[in-house]
Image (tube, rainbow, N blue to C red):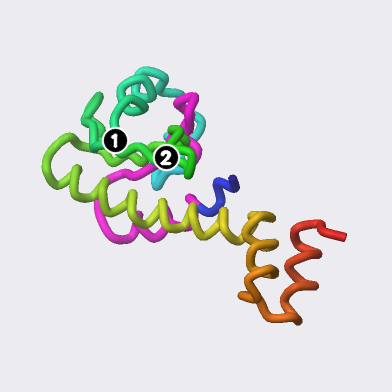
Amino acid sequence: MSNSVFQSVMLQLKETTDRIFGVIDTEGYVVSSTDVAFLGERWPEAVLKVSGSQEVVAFGQKTFKPMFNSANYFEYAVFCTGDDELARAYCSMAYIALNNAKVFYEEKHDRGTFVKNIIMDNILPGDIYIRAKELHFA
């Protein structure tokens, strides 16, 4: 998945609060953040702590909320600096925004959904050719 989707949401979050938000992947690398100094850092201990939970987890002065894919496997985790109740609330709200962006991106670039939409007649005939070209269908 493109990390630019996450980064566009991060830029919007940066303007709303003084906290630092970000996203880590399954290996613990910070793939997106409101503070560019965090990009590329690796936090493997955070992944171990977060991946086993469905709830908000506080670890190392940061609050994390895991993001799972449709097969219920850990994919990413959203984080917010701080470990207080406000950080939990911010992290949950950032999770909602980022998860919705992720789902939208995956649906937009998913070949299976495209074929389903053709079969179910949920796509305009003119859009079929454009989407087929984007998804590299012959």
Q: Which residues are magenta?
A: 6-31
Q: In the image, is residue 49 above or below residue 127?
A: above
Apparent side of residue 17 relative to residue 74 in the rendered image (left or right): left
Instruction: Give residue 117's quadrant in the image.
Output: bottom right
Instruction: Give residue 123's quadrant in the image.
Output: bottom right
The image position of residue 4, as x and y in percent, is 56, 51
Q: CA distance from mark 1 to mark 2?
A: 9 Å
| Depth order, front residue of 98/107 | 107
Q: Secondary structure at mark 2?
A: strand
Q: Which residue is mark 2?
A: 68
Q: In the image, is residue 123 above or below residue 87?
A: below
| Depth order, front residue of 47/136 | 136
Apparent side of residue 18 relative to residue 25 in the rendered image (left or right): left
How many circles with numbers are drawn on the protein? 2
The image position of residue 24, as x and y in percent, is 43, 34
Q: Are marks 1 and 2 in contact (CB under 8 Å)?
A: yes
Residue located at (57% from left, 53% from top) = 106
Q: Secondary structure at mark 1?
A: loop
Considering every residue shown, the one lying at the far right of the view is 138
| Depth order, front residue of 87/74 | 74
Give the quarter of the figure containing the C terminus. Answer: bottom right
The reply to whether the magenta stretch includes residue 28 is: yes
Considering every residue shown, the one lying at the far left of the view is 85
The image position of residue 8, as x and y in percent, is 48, 57
The reply to whether the magenta stretch includes residue 126 is: no
Residue located at (28% from left, 41% from top) = 80
Residue located at (82% from left, 59% from top) = 137
Q: Which residue is mark 1?
A: 54
Q: Amino acid at mark 2?
A: Phe
